[in-house]
Image (cartoon, helix red, strand yellow):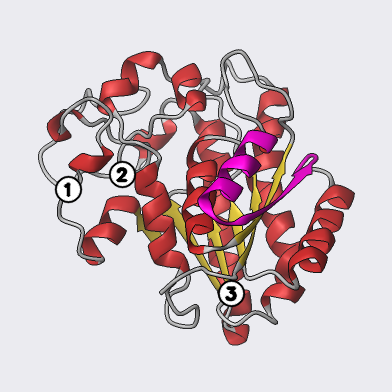
Amino acid sequence: MSLAGKTIIMSGGSRGIGEAIAVKAAADGANVALLAKTTEPHPKLPGTIHTAAEAIERAGGQALPLVGDIRDDAFVEEAVRQTAERFGGIDIVVNNASAIDLSSTEDVSMKKYDLMNDINARGSFLLSKTAIPWLKQAANPHILTLSPPISTDPKWFTRHTAYTMAKYAMSIVTLGMAGELAEHGVAANSLWPRTAIDTAAVRNVVGAGLLKHSRTPQIMADAAHEILIKPSREVTGQFFIDDDVLEAAGVTDFSVYLNGGAEEDLALDFWVEPKGPHDPNLTMGA
């Protein structure tokens, strides 16, 4: 079971979880087109679309870095066209790009509200929609969106309603695409981490103190790989959690994903529940 020869088009991917997923697929021999804006390193966000492309090619895949804005219809349409032309089609869409602001409703600016919804919700919808004609022609087509299971528990709306709305909208893209595309055999699923994942973006927003309470991005890459090799007609409309996916695949030792801390010290990510007893203070943003 491999992604060899498959073509992935991914929003974002210049660093963090997206890059890890891309490099994991590239190790199989996959082709990966990255749609991202970052061409120069940010002081607090190392990595660019070009360094990610180099990592993909070092891993054994082919990379197509496409610089632009996921909010730009013309750019996305052209990126899909170039990807299909370069690699002969598109097998997989990964909706990875996401903006985050954990401000309360009173404090969040409408500019940030619009940014989160434009990138998270609209961007995921646009890239998936634009790739549909190619996905319908693929042998085992998947759309994978990095978004959480939808919970109506009020606790998820007490701190950052705007961000929750934007992430849940990505999850609605999964539900909608799964329903609309089922007859064509195109799978649409979501993947979310149970715990905090150590990325530069999370460190900037939530704080560097989360480091030892996090897992590495590799757990999401390994889980994404497991989903993307599954038969698309058999697994769709699901909201997967990373360690559940790997446990079902036979993984028993999760210590390889620790980031300097211990299993009992891991902080839960937003919108997920613990598997066992959990310190409520060890939750992102708590």
User: Helix, strand, or loop for circle 1?
Assistant: loop
Say which of 173 and 91 sits in front: 91
Judging by the rendered image, the residue that carries numbered circle 2 is 194
Label 3 packing within 10 angstroms: few (<14), some (14-19), many (20+): many
In the rendered image, residue 44 lying in the magenta stretch gets the answer: no
Residue 146 at least partly seen: no
Q: CA distance from mark 3 to mark 1?
A: 31 Å
- Callout in the foreground (3, 2): 3
Residue 207: give x, y in percent of width and height: 41, 16
Q: SS class of the residue under badge 3?
A: loop
Q: Horizontal and vertical percent for residue 102? A: 50, 24
Q: Residue at x 35, y 36 (%)?
A: 216
Element on which disc 2 rests: loop
Q: Determine the residue located farthest toward the left in the rendered image.
A: 277
Q: Label 3 belongs to which residue? A: 141
- Indicate which disc residue 275 carries: 1
Magenta extent:
50-70
**If you read the primary sequence from the N terminus, does the residue marked by circle 3 or circle 1 appear first?**
3
- Determine the CA span between mark 2 and mark 1: 9 Å
CB-based contact (under 8 Å), mark 2 and mark 1 = yes
Type of amino acid at the residue the image marks with label 3: Pro
Above/below status of 116 relative to 41 = below
